[in-house]
């Protein structure tokens, strides 16, 4: 359930007592119909609760139903915002929106719905779908992978990606400062999480160590710096190292273009609830 809604939603009225038990049984049986494997088990539960209604079960379904309503509202808002950003008078865009390939991406995105974690993620989903309709910089396979990233990575991952963008090489220490974090001990949990995060993005093909490149894009080998004899073992690299620089891969650049570039709104829209407010 999303935490973006304010406390007013919690005051929404639900049927109590026996009436709500009937509603919850109906919802549970409907869910069982959507999941073939679990259908028999859920139907059995619903039958048991029809004999002995439990207040705790009612509370659970109250929040479950409210969570479904919130998710539907998020999806509706996202779809409307996408359409408000597309020039459907453009034949190419209209053709793209109606294509089986684009419809497949939209169905998968709304079925999996990884955007409920934060408002930032919902906006990334909206931007990717809008840009996937309006341009063809990335293939559909790459666009699908972008949605996998939205599901897999945290908001902090995306803060790091945004910090590396347009930097022409940036150190881990500078990234840490750009995302507004205070310096912590090297042996702290925060430092360990940060190192893991950098490793996630590196192995995921989103960022890489900055290297000078030749005409064909091949990295130019760095000059080997020999350590003086007797200087001892090489000291461990800090989580907040200031020497090694990082940059976005081409895949990371395309993600920025799709997820973090918001198309201008062409049609203003107000939700019905907003219009009813004085």
Image (cartoon, rainbow, N blue to C red):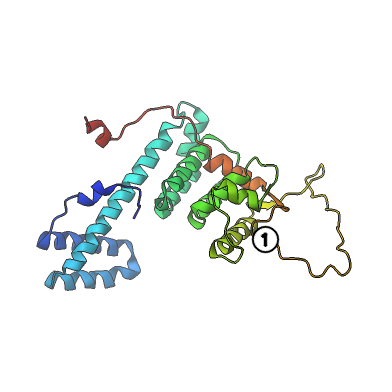
Q: Quadrant of residue 266?
A: top left
Whether residue 139 is visible, yes or no, is: no
Q: Is residue 19 left or right of residue 35?
A: left
Q: Quadrant of residue 15?
A: bottom left
Q: Is residue 135 left or right of residue 46?
A: right
Name the image quarter holding the N terminus: bottom left
Across and down, in percent, residue 24 comes to 20, 61
Across and down, in percent, residue 184 comes to 57, 59
Q: Is residue 253 above or below residue 196?
A: above
Instruction: Identify which residue is drawn at 50% across, 55% down.
Output: 154
- Residue named by callout 1: 238
Instruction: Identify which residue is drawn at 39% across, 41% down.
Output: 78
Instruction: Identify which residue is drawn at 34% across, 30% down.
Output: 269
Name the image quarter holding the C terminus: top left
Q: Nearer the viewer, residue 220 or 104?
A: 220
Across and down, in percent, residue 259 comes to 52, 43
Whether residue 15 is visible, yes or no, is: yes
Residues packed near mark 1 inside 10 Å, few (<14), some (14 to 19) or many (20 plus)? some
Across and down, in percent, residue 32 comes to 28, 65
Q: Nearer the viewer, residue 111 or 191?
A: 191
Q: Is residue 66 above or below residue 76?
A: below
Instruction: Identify which residue is drawn at 52% across, 34% down.
Output: 134
Q: Quadrant of residue 74?
A: top left
Q: Is residue 69 left or right of residue 209?
A: left
SS of the residue under disc 1: loop
């Amino acid at each position: 359930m999303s935490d973006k809604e304010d406390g007013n939603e919690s005051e929404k009225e639900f049927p109590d007592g026996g009436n709500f038990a009937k509603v919850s049984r109906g919802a549970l049986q409907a869910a069982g119909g959507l999941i073939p494997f679990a259908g028999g088990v859920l139907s059995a539960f619903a039958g048991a609760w029809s004999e002995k209604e439990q207040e705790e079960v009612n509370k659970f379904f109250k929040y479950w139903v409210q969570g479904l309503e919130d998710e539907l509202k998020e999806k509706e808002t996202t779809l409307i915002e996408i359409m408000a950003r597309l020039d459907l008078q453009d034949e190419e865009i209209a053709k793209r929106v109606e294509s089986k390939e684009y419809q497949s991406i939209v169905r998968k995105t709304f079925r999996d719905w990884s955007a409920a974690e934060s408002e930032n993620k919902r906006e990334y989903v909206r931007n990717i779908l809008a840009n996937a309709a309006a341009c063809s910089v990335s293939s559909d396979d790459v666009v699908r992978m972008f949605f996998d990233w939205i599901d897999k990575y945290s908001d902090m991952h995306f803060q790091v990606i945004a910090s590396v963008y347009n930097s022409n090489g940036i150190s881990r220490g500078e990234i840490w400062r750009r995302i507004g974090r205070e310096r912590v001990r090297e042996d702290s949990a925060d430092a360990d999480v940060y190192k893991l995060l950098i490793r996630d993005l590196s192995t995921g093909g989103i960022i890489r160590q900055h290297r000078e490149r030749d005409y064909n894009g091949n990295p130019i080998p760095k000059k080997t710096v020999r350590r003086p004899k007797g200087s001892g073992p090489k000291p461990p690299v800090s989580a907040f190292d200031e020497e090694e620089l990082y940059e976005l891969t081409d895949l990371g650049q395309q993600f920025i273009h799709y997820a973090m570039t918001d198309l201008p709104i062409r049609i203003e829209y107000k939700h019905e609830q907003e219009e009813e407010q004085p």
